[in-house]
Image (spheres, rainbow, N blue to C red):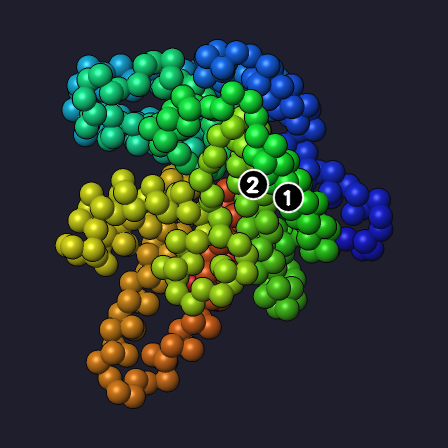
Amino acid sequence: MPDALTPDIALGYVTSLLQALKPFSYFAWVAAGALLFWLLPVGRRPFAVLPISLAITLLGEGRPWLLPAIAALVFIGVYAAVRARWSTRFVVAGVIGLYAGLHFLFGLITFTDALNGLALTPDYVLFTLGLPVAFSFFRLISFAVDAPKLAPGELPGLYDYLTWMFFFPTFAHVPFIKHGPFLSQLAALPARPSDFELGRGARRIAQALLKGILAGLMYAVMYPASVLLDPFAHPAWQVAAAIPWMALIFYVGFSGYADLSVGVGHLFGLTLPESFAPLGKLLRTTRARDFWRNWNLTTAAWLGEYVYAPLGGFRRHPLRNTMLTMILCGLWHSVSVLGLAWGAGLGGMMVVEHWLAKARLRQASPPVWQSGRAFKTLGAALMFGLIALINLAITPFAYTAQNVGGLVNVFVRLVAP
C-alpha cells in the first residue's frame, strides 16, 4: 500500500493503467484508420481492413514486425493444410503442439537465463507476444475444425481468411468471432457509417477508458499483487481483502479490453460479440457453472463447442467432460503446473456443486455442510481466490525468480505449516 494516496500517486497509477490498456497513439491510429476506411469506395473497404489492421498493430500498438510476419506463416500453413484436406485431427494436434512449444519458450524467458541474449523480458513477452498467440489459437482451432465441413466453393479465400485472423481488435484480445459471421458482416457493409453505430463505438471506447482509470485507482488504494505474493508478511485482513480486490481488478481490466474491442469494431461497421456480462449479474450468480457462462462469454462458448461437446457433452460422462474442459481452460491460460491446478480447481468446484445438488434432491433434510447457503458462501470465496490466483500467475507480477520463489513458499507453507 502507498504511504499516502496523493494526487500525484493516483495520477501515476491511472496513467500507467491507461497506457497498459492501450498506448495513447493507438487511438489516433484507430481514428485515422476508420476515417480512411469509410472514405474508400464501398467495394474497396473489405480489401482495406487487412492493411489497416497491420498498420495499427505495428504502429498504433507498437508490436514488433516479426509478430505478424511469423503469425502469417503459421496462419497460411494452417489454411493450406485445411485446403489440402489434411486430417482435421492432425491439423488440430499440430496447432496445439505449436501452442505448447511457444509456451515452453515463454517459460524459458520467464524462469531461466537460457534466452537472455534475445533481450526479451517476461512482461514484454506476455503483452506483446503472449496474448496474440493465445487468442489466435482459438481462431486457428475453429477454422481447422469448421472449414473442412464446408463445400469447396464455400471456403474463404486466403486474403479474406487473413483479414479475419489479423483484424486488430481481436488479433490480441477478446472477443472470439468465427470467420463466417465476420466475413458476412464485412461483405454487407453499408454505403456510409451509421451515426448510431459510431455513437455506440465511441461510448464503448469511453467506457473502456473509464474502466482503465478505475483499475488504476483501485491499484492505488491497494496493491494486491504484493500482498498475495508474500501473504505471510501481511496481516490476515489484508490478505483476505486482497483476494476479492485482485479478482475485481481483473474483471475491470479484462472487461475494459473487451469494451475497447467491441467499440472499435463498431467504428468499422462490425458488431463483435459481447464477452462479459455486467458486473452486477456476475455478482448475483449463485453457481460456478452460471458464473463461468457470464465471465467470458465467447471463451466459454468456444470451450463448449470445441472441447466439451467433442468429449461427449452432457450425453456421455458430463462430469468427466466438465473436469477435462476446465483443465484444458487452465492450460490455455498457462501451460504449466499452475495452469493445470487452476483448471482442476474450477472443474472440481463444478463437479462438487453438481454432486451436492443431486444429494439435496435425494434428501429431505440434508446436512448443514450440504446446504445451498453454505456451499454458495464457500464457492464464492473459492471463486474469488481462483480468479485472483490466475490473474497473479499470468501477469508480470509473478514473472520473476523472486516472486516465483514466493509462490512456491506459499504453497509449501500451506501444505506443511
Residue at 58% from the left image edge and 55% from the top image edge = 248
Tell me if 303 is positioned left or right of 86 in this view.
right
Specify which label sits upstream in the sequence, 1 or 2. 1
Q: Is residue 415 left or right of residue 322?
A: right
Q: Nearer the viewer, residue 179 or 386?
A: 179
Using a 10 Å C-alpha cutoff, classify the residue at mark 2 as few (fewer than 14 neighbours), some (14 to 19) or many (20 or more): many
Q: Position of residue 128 (x, y in %)?
A: 54, 27
Q: Percent x, y for residue 416?
A: 44, 64
Q: Position of residue 111 (x, y in %)?
A: 49, 35
Q: Position of residue 59 (x, y in %)?
A: 62, 17
Tell me the amino acid under the disc marked 2.
Answer: Asp
Which quadrant holds the N terminus? bottom right
Q: Residue furthest front?
A: 191
Residue type of the residue flagged with mark 1: Gln
Using the rendered view, name the quadrant where residue 164 is placed. Answer: top left
Quadrant of the image occupied by residue 16: top right
Disc number placed over residue 259 in the picture, else none: 2
Q: Is residue 214 left or right of residue 406?
A: right
Residue extending furthest bottom?
Answer: 365
Residue under label 1: 207
**Do the residues under discs 1 and 2 have CB atoms within 8 angstroms?**
yes
Which structural element holds mark 1? helix
Give the Cα separation between the discs numbered 1 and 2.
Answer: 7 Å
Q: Residues within 10 Å of mark 1 (few under 14, many from 20)?
A: some
Q: Where residue 341 is drawn, which disc sits there?
A: none
SS class, disc 2: helix
Q: Depth check: 255 or 234 in front?
A: 255
**Can residue 154 be seen in this snapshot?**
yes
